[in-house]
Image: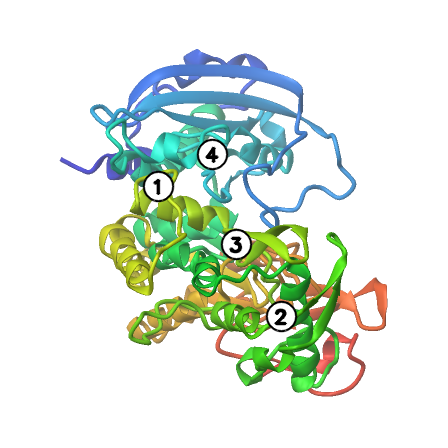
């Protein structure tokens, strides 16, 4: 018997025998009757709701996608859209899960651009109804899924069973299964409604959405013609526990630096290394050449606001910052995962809440805290206080041993994607403060080792000075990457460069444009006006 996902794909290829519309559907076609055959072999439909909506509010769109996923229409704040909205609730028999999938179709056929587009999720959210609204507003058919849990649920609510064990079906749903099913269901619904296949299908996500994009590239590349994966939280089994490294070291050293001190280290590193690329613009474009020593700030005073006060930097504070820059290291000195570049803001990795500059409490990165508490300790009340280096190493090993095959999303073998003809474009801000850039670089290098021609179908662009999924002072490609992908898929225009927009040097109210380079080429200043794109090249 064919796997269920393959069977569904065969249906898409013309073997699906349900009655379909052969002409442009009218509003009356947006009804449950039209979609009565919408299902998959391995699921049990609990409910199917279909509504035709004129002037449906799109306020709150992209709420699950994070920043830098798909830009909204310029100047549109409270736009409405005419949408055929399908809400599907189903379960995998025997798995005790309950998944909500949402499908959005431009209500009038002449408003459909003959394409299918899915948004990615963010954090612990796989997606939701809001994720389909911008694509439909832009003329795309779309689908999304909550993968079995919504924003009101804590991670422990869905991540653990009633017996306090890992809820493996729920984790698999979140990792990739529900995503691929939402894609198949969305494309089937598109064909049922319009009477034809989408000409092109796209995935566009960042952070969790970037990981989801890589999951589709590794497992189901045939579902998409083009995949955009920004700041991908891949190698999740290492990335997640690594995010607790800073707070762990802080408790070992019994030091809780206020945010003003953390920022002082970042600004000092930028001041020291900014000029290495030839341009003083607040960006460290060559982080590998930066050798800033955090201990050089020991005994310096920092004037703080919120809370107000003056505090002297200690060696313990410098050691915590150095540890976050280096990344987690095992008790015997082996690197466990990557650290952060010097110009990345470290407030999320060593955040604190303070009543005074000398009275602070460390606040762990929520994703990492959830991962360790729920999926490793399997105790929502677990605390890192009192953990030893040996304890941390054991948690890290447990994460990779038990979860790499489920949610690691780190298989460098993209031969299925190559065979499918799918293209993937990944990009990552070099000042990312949540997902270490070098983790994506390492993965890309692994794909090159397996296929020296990987750039024919998968390219990585690094964006100096750009933070997580966009913003920062650097060359941000979030607004241009989707058009670049469409040109690659639909016109065969290979992305030799990726346009990014940054704050102009000397004029913070203006912008400058730069053209980022496919890895391993390096975005390089060659002289001239620093606000001119022609002053930079790829080497």
User: Which residue is found at the position 35% from the left and 73% from the top?
Assistant: 335
Mark nearer the N terminus (2 vs 3): 2
Q: Mark 3 points at which residue?
A: 490
Nearest to the eye among marks 1 and 4: give it: 1
Instruction: Please give the label number shown on residue 4.
Output: none
Mark 2–mark 4 Cα distance, whole angstroms, equals 34 Å
Mark nearer the N terminus (2 vs 1): 2
Q: Position of residue 403 (x, y in %)?
A: 27, 50
Mark nearer the N terminus (1 vs 3): 1
Q: Mark 2 points at which residue?
A: 343
Secondary structure state at the residue bearing disc 4:
strand
From the viewer's side, name the closer residue of 174 and 41. 174
Nearest to the eye among marks 2 and 4: give it: 2
Secondary structure state at the residue bearing disc 1:
helix
Nearest to the eye among marks 2 and 1: give it: 1
Mark 1–mark 3 Cα distance, whole angstroms, equals 43 Å
Mark 3–mark 4 Cα distance, whole angstroms, equals 23 Å
Q: Position of residue 518 (x, y in %)?
A: 52, 72
Mark nearer the N terminus (2 vs 4): 4
Mark nearer the N terminus (1 vs 4): 4
Q: Name the residue under label 1.
A: 374
In the displayed structure, 431 sits above or below 109; it is below
Q: In which quarter of the image is the N terminus?
A: top left
Mark nearer the N terminus (3 vs 4): 4
Mark 2–mark 3 Cα distance, whole angstroms, equals 37 Å
Could you tell me if the residues under marks 2 and 4 are in contact, i.e. CB atoms within 8 Å? no
Q: Name the residue under label 4.
A: 144
């Amino acid at each position: 018997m064919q796997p269920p996902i393959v069977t569904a794909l065969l249906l898409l290829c013309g073997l699906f025998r349900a009655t379909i519309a052969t002409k442009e559907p009218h509003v009356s076609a947006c009804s449950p009757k039209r979609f009565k055959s919408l299902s998959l072999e391995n699921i049990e439909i609990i409910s199917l709701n279909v509504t035709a909506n004129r002037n449906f509010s799109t306020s709150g769109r992209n709420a699950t996608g994070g920043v830098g996923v798909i830009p909204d229409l310029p100047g549109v704040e409270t736009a409405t859209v005419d949408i055929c909205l399908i809400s599907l609730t189903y379960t995998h028999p025997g798995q005790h899960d309950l998944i909500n999938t949402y499908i959005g179709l431009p209500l009038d056929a002449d408003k459909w651009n003959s394409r299918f587009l899915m948004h990615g999720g963010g954090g612990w959210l796989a997606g939701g109804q809001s994720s389909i609204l911008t694509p439909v507003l832009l003329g795309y058919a779309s689908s999304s899924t909550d993968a079995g849990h919504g924003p009101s649920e804590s991670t422990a609510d869905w991540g653990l069973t009633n017996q306090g064990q890992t809820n493996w079906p729920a984790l698999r749903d979140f990792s990739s299964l529900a995503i691929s099913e939402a894609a198949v269901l969305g494309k089937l619904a598109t064909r049922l409604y319009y009477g034809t296949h989408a000409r092109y299908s796209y995935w566009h996500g960042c952070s969790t959405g970037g990981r989801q994009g890589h999951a589709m590239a590794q497992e189901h590349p045939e579902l998409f013609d083009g995949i955009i994966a920004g700041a991908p939280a891949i190698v999740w089994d290492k990335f997640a526990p690594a995010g607790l490294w800073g707070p762990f070291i802080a408790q070992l050293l019994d030091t809780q630096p206020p945010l003003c001190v953390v920022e002082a280290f970042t600004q000092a590193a930028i001041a020291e290394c900014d000029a290495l690329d030839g341009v003083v613009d607040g960006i460290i474009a060559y982080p590998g050449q930066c050798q800033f020593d955090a201990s050089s700030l020991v005994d310096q005073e920092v004037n703080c606001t919120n809370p107000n006060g003056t505090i002297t930097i200690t060696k313990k504070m410098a050691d915590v910052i150095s540890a976050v820059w280096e990344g987690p290291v095992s008790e015997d000195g082996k690197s466990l995962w990557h650290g952060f570049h010097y110009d990345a803001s470290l407030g999320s990795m060593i955040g604190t809440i303070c009543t005074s500059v000398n009275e602070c409490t460390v606040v762990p990165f929520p994703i990492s805290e959830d991962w360790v508490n729920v999926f490793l300790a399997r105790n929502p009340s677990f605390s890192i206080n009192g953990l030893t280096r040996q304890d941390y190493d054991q948690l890290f090993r447990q994460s990779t041993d038990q979860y790499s095959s489920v949610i690691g999303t780190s298989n460098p073998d993209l031969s299925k994607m190559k065979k499918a003809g799918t293209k993937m474009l990944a990009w990552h801000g070099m000042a990312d403060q949540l997902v270490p850039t070098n983790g994506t670089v390492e993965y890309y290098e692994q794909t090159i080792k397996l296929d020296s021609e990987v750039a024919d179908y998968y390219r990585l662009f690094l964006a100096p000075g750009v933070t997580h999924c966009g913003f920062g002072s650097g060359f941000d490609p979030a607004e241009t990457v989707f058009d670049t992908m469409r040109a690659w898929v639909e016109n065969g225009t290979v992305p030799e460069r990726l346009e990014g927009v940054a704050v102009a040097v000397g004029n913070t109210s203006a912008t400058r444009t730069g053209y980022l380079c496919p890895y391993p080429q390096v975005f390089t200043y060659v002289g001239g006006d620093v606000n001119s794109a022609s002053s930079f090249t790829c080497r």
